[in-house]
Image: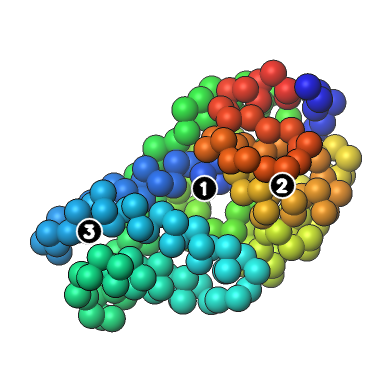
């Protein structure tokens, strides 16, 4: 296995890599549905929502939809599929409440804090995220992640989203880091891994779901496995 212990800067994705987006998202929707008195099954809703959210995020990453469309259609599609009648006004309210409540939950992937404690003395740690700035800042503060990271690059700051090369260049500049000193770690093969490699940065694929990819890129399926590499 390739050893990256000579590296100086580690760039992490946040959602689905350190911060357990799906678990926290489920709690946020559970809170909203209770408030609204919805009889809809949370399990059924999430079984549709998770893939639709991923679908629209991929479109958002390559600038094919706006963040307003992302927030609207990932909900609209699910309610339509479940034949659950909600107005556009209610969808807008749910979307707003979701963004409000989501950072209140702070479940991390198993081993996240142990890993960061292990890495912090030996590397300078950074975040690169496509998530919305205000939401991501709240997530990191509430999950007590902010103290580990020296810089946080988001797509609003950089003017582009992963996998675009310019967001990686922006993050490197902000971190005062050289490409050859750096590693990107993330769960999205397209956005994090291919994006980083295209920008000339080594990458480690956090493949927690054991997705089959035709690649020689280094991958782990548990965060603590990174201790064997870094």
The answer to the question of whether label 3 and label 1 lie on touching residues, with beta carbons closer than 8 A, is no
Image coordinates of residue 3 in percent, x first then y, are 81, 23
For this view, does 92 lie left or right of residue 131?
A: left
The answer to whether residue 59 is seen in the rendering is yes
Q: Which callout, 2 or 1, points at the residue further toward the start of the chain?
A: 1
Is residue 33 found left or right of 65 in the rendered image?
left
Secondary structure, mark 2, is helix
30 and 143: which one is in front?
30
Pick the residue in front: 32 or 176: 32
Q: Are marks 2 and 1 in contact (CB under 8 Å)?
A: no
Is 185 placed above or below 56 here? above
On screen, 153 above or below 225? below
As drawn, the label of residue 193 is 2
Name the foreground residue: 168 vs 71.
Answer: 71
Say whether disc 3 or disc 1 marks the residue closer to the N-terminus. 1
Q: Which residue is mark 3?
A: 32
Residue at position x 66%, y 63% in the image: 161
Residue at image position (58%, 41%) is 211
| Vertical comparison of 186 with 87: above or below | above
| Residue at disc 1, secondary structure | loop
Q: Position of residue 186 (x, y in %)?
A: 63, 43
- Left or right? Give the position of 81 relative to 116: left
Q: Residues within 10 Å of mark 3 (few under 14, many from 20)?
A: some
Q: Which mark is residue 15?
A: 1
> Which mark is in front, 2 or 3?
2
Which quadrant: the C terminus? Answer: top right
Work out how far the residue at label 2 is from the one at label 3, CA to CA, in angstroms.
34 Å
How far across and how far down the image is residue 41, in percent? 19, 54
Q: What is the CA distance from the residue labelled 2 to the residue labelled 1?
A: 14 Å
Q: Residue at x 58, y 69 (%)?
A: 59
Q: Is residue 126 visible?
A: no
């Amino acid at each position: 296995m390739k050893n990256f212990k000579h590296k100086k800067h580690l760039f992490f994705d946040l959602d689905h890599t350190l911060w357990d987006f799906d678990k926290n998202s489920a709690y946020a929707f559970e809170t909203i549905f209770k408030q609204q008195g919805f009889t809809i099954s949370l399990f059924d809703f999430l079984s549709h929502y998770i893939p639709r959210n991923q679908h629209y995020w991929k479109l958002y990453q390559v600038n094919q939809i706006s963040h307003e469309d992302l927030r609207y259609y990932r909900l609209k599609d699910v309610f339509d599929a479940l034949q659950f009648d909600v107005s556009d006004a209610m969808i807008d309210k749910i979307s707003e409440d979701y963004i409000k409540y989501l950072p209140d939950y702070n479940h991390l992937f198993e081993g996240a804090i142990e890993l960061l404690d292990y890495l912090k003395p030996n590397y300078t740690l950074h975040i690169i995220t496509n998530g919305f700035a205000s939401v991501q800042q709240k997530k990191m503060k509430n999950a007590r992640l902010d103290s580990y990271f020296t810089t946080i690059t988001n797509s609003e700051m950089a003017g582009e989203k992963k996998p675009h090369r310019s967001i990686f260049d922006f993050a490197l500049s902000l971190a005062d880091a050289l490409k050859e000193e750096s590693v990107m770690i993330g769960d999205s093969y397209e956005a994090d891994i291919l994006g980083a490699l295209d920008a000339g940065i080594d990458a480690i694929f956090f493949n927690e779901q054991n997705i089959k990819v035709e690649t020689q890129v280094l991958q782990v399926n548990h965060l603590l496995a990174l201790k064997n590499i870094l």
